[in-house]
Amino acid sequence: MKTPEKLVALYQNHLNSMKQFFITLLCVAVSFAAMAQLQSPDAFLGYRIGDKFTPHHRVVDYFRHAAAQASGQIKLVEYGNSYEGRPLIAAIVSSAANMSRLEDIRQNNLRLTGLLEGLGNINTPTIVWMSYNVHGNEAVSTEAVMLTLYELLTQRSTWLNDVVVILDPCVNPDGHSRYVNWYVQMLGARPDVHGDAREHHEPWPGGRYNHYTFDLNRDWAWQSQQETRQRLAFYQQWMPQIHGDFHEMGAEQPYYFAPAAEPYHKEITNWQREFQTIVGKNIARYFDQNKWMYFTRETFDLLYPSYGDTWPTYNGAIGMTYEQGGSGRAGLGILLNNGDTLTLRKRIDHQHMAGIATIEAAVQQKNRLIQEFKNYFEQARTNPAGAYKSFIVSANNDAYKLKMLTDYLDRNHIRYGLAGATASLKAFNFQTGREEMVNISRNDLVISTFQPKSVLVKVLFNPRTVLVDSVTYDATAWSLPYAMGLQAYASTERIAQNAYTAPAFTKNVPMQGGAYAYLSTWKNFGHARLLAALIKQGVNVRFAEQPFSINGTVYERGALMISRADNMHISNFDEVVTNAANTVEVTIQGTSSGLASKGIDLGSTNFQLIKAPRVALVAGDGVYPTSFGEAWHYFDHLLDYPVTVINSSMLNRIDWNKYDVVILPAGNYNSNLDISAAKAWMRNGGRLIAMENAINVFADKEGFLLKTKQDDKGKDEKPKPEELLKKYGDRERSALVNSVEGSIFLATIDATHPLAFGYQETYHTLKHINNFYEYLNGGWNVGVLKSDAYVDGFVGSKAKEKLKNSLVFGVENIGRGALIYLVDSPIYRHSWQNGHLLFSNAIFFVGQ
């Protein structure tokens, strides 16, 4: 017999159930009423989708219209802004019942990952995230997403009971707008489908890139760009089971979808592979019905961690790339080799159908998706695969570099702590490249693989990339300890952790009675930012060419000295200097005397006065947009120092004497650069920084020292007969013998040269361009690769031989100036943070 208390409880539960039922019923009724007011994209825009490109602001308008008219089934989120101020939006779409408990669904999903405390319930909708138009001139997907949104709300409502769909209609609105605005200006009364027409040839830099000409589809792991950081902060609030990334490729190619090509990273699970096939088969079913051409398992692999398919995959989702033939070349229509015309509408239909088929597969596989997602993170937390269980970052590392690392880990929700105890254990030493006994201190930073982001940790930190296939789409090595210049170890042991509290920055205070001078070491990029800040305020700064000690502190070459004697024009000298240091959070030391206890005194001529450099950066035709963008963004947002951007077409017309430093990013300058004028400017004290293949302007030219490396085989030596027996089917793989696929090498550094101040005797460099140069005969070989320099990544056999005893960084003195050769970019994609200081050396120190 039920007690009165139990009867009351049963009655209360019944009332709660009825209440929830009526709330759901009301939501559905309101949704049906609102849906009657929802317009199709064609009706809202006033033209048929595919008849023209839709400006970004009108796409945003349509999403806002849909959110207003179908408020019970859609939530519009503005998660950030582009560099040019355009809104970054995403629509969250699901059933009315799911939308009424959307926050519960989100939190439950994070509990499944372990990123949020508590037990997650697997009886929950699956989450599908679709990203469109990361490359701005691949604009077809932003058109398609409007059709997808409308179809989900009007025709696929039953699916929405089992799925939450997040649609990001335009990841790169600045690039999209650059392309669409240009195309509209080029268009006549009707589209010209002939490939020679100007509407099929974008001007530099094209719409592919964001404002700073970064490729946002190479920025997922490094998160250097504003759009990426804002998007991934939002993404990690949801952690979807599926992420679809929509692209375009060459116009003559049909359509590509999953499964991806080899190589797959070894951390990708069997289920992630299997679901790629499930989705591929479902898309193929629709494409077959429409007799649309497509291909799978070619070209687009799953290795490099900074793509829109791989980064989500390493975060537990099934990440997939979709590629429609067309891109910026295709416009509203382009004539193909087979005589057909590829129209914008055809491209839209393909992208739309691929998205719909993916969501359908997710609904059909909902239970399996959720269960495998839960299993993925349970294994990550309790039994991670792989040999290394802990990555240890020494407390002896520079404090600024450690902060850069912990900030990066925080952005990626990667957990870390302190070792908490001293220990001696066998581990892989990143600096020596060997397994050896190492001593761990209690203040060392430990990143364990026993955590929700276990796979991402292993992908980012493992010292070796395992390659199943050498034919890959991008870089093959990227380990963070190399990229950040950190003393670190990889251990097979699980190391216990104590809580880590980031040390608070202790502000500098003006020295009592006024300082004779303020001193700063030169060890990290923070010191370069301090120098830039002081120069901009008119403060005179010197740098040390020799080491010295003062007040118990040892200062190596490159140390900054800001003396009162050099700055008598600044009345509040102490406040200006300390405030600048506090702004960039760099510790400086005041001294009341210029007498050193060891080494040079502060009045020595070995302290070089830094003349504020007037810097020009070349852009425009012939220049690689991404190489230019790395430098432009570096000055604007990392260094915060003025730079004048000049077009390459102006190089033969500018007054070189207006600039102290001119930077040539990677590119082809042979038709734009008057070498004799540049050389005359250098003789008078100018410094020219040539990056990557921009160096070829000077290589093997009369009057310059740089020489390209030749094959060991003589020009007249005939190949052996067996070398001629090549298989046609192996031509792509055979060509790789001469290539470097984003590989890491250990450069030997001359730390006494100003270009290398702040570094020790070695520097890990990332090679990704197949340029090989001999040591400078008569110049300064500041960074070189010796015979045993290879560390990680794919390198063709012939390329590896050419790289032995080759130049990485060099300086050729020309009169009172200098030509600085940066064979490898020290600021590549801003992923290689350890090179930022070296680039600053080239700007501020060399040739002063």
Image (cartoon, grey):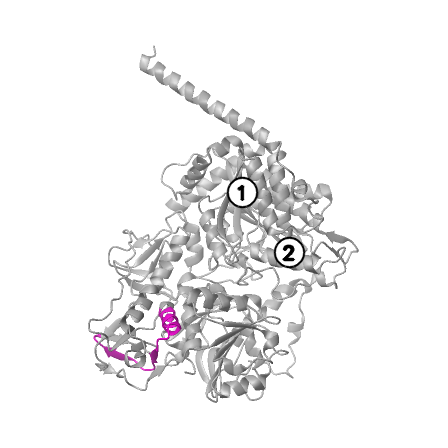
Label 1: state its secondary structure.
strand
Nearest the eye: 76 or 476: 76
Spatial CA span between label 1 and label 2: 22 Å
Q: Amino acid at mark 1?
A: Ala
Residue 596 location in percent, x, y? 23, 81
Query: Could you tell me which residue is drawn at 40 percent across and 39 percent down?
Result: 111
Q: Quadrant of residue 146 in the image?
A: top right
Residue 45 location in percent, x, y? 66, 44
Q: Comparing marks 1 and 2, which lies closer to the viewer?
A: 2
Label 2: state its secondary structure.
helix
Picture disc at residue 374: none
Of the image marks 1 and 2, the number of the one nearer the N terminus: 1
Q: Residues within 10 Å of mark 2 (few under 14, many from 20)?
A: many
Q: Which residues are magenta?
A: 527-552
* Residue tagged 2: 180
Q: Residues within 10 Å of mark 1 (few under 14, many from 20)?
A: many
- Residue 819 relative to residue 284: left or right: left
- Residue 674 relative to residue 379: left or right: right
Residues under numbered marks 1 and 2 in contact, where contact means CB atoms less than 8 Å apart = no
Nearest the eye: 622 or 267: 622
The vertical placement of 311 against 535, above or below, is above
Q: In the rendered image, is residue 749 in sight?
A: no
Picture disc at residue 91: 1
Nearest the eye: 14 or 764: 14
Q: Amino acid at mark 2?
A: Val
Residue 519 location in percent, x, y? 28, 74
The vertical placement of 839 against 256, above or below, is below
Query: Could you tell me which residue is drawn at 67 percent across and 70 percent down?
Result: 725
- Residue 264 relative to residue 116: left or right: right
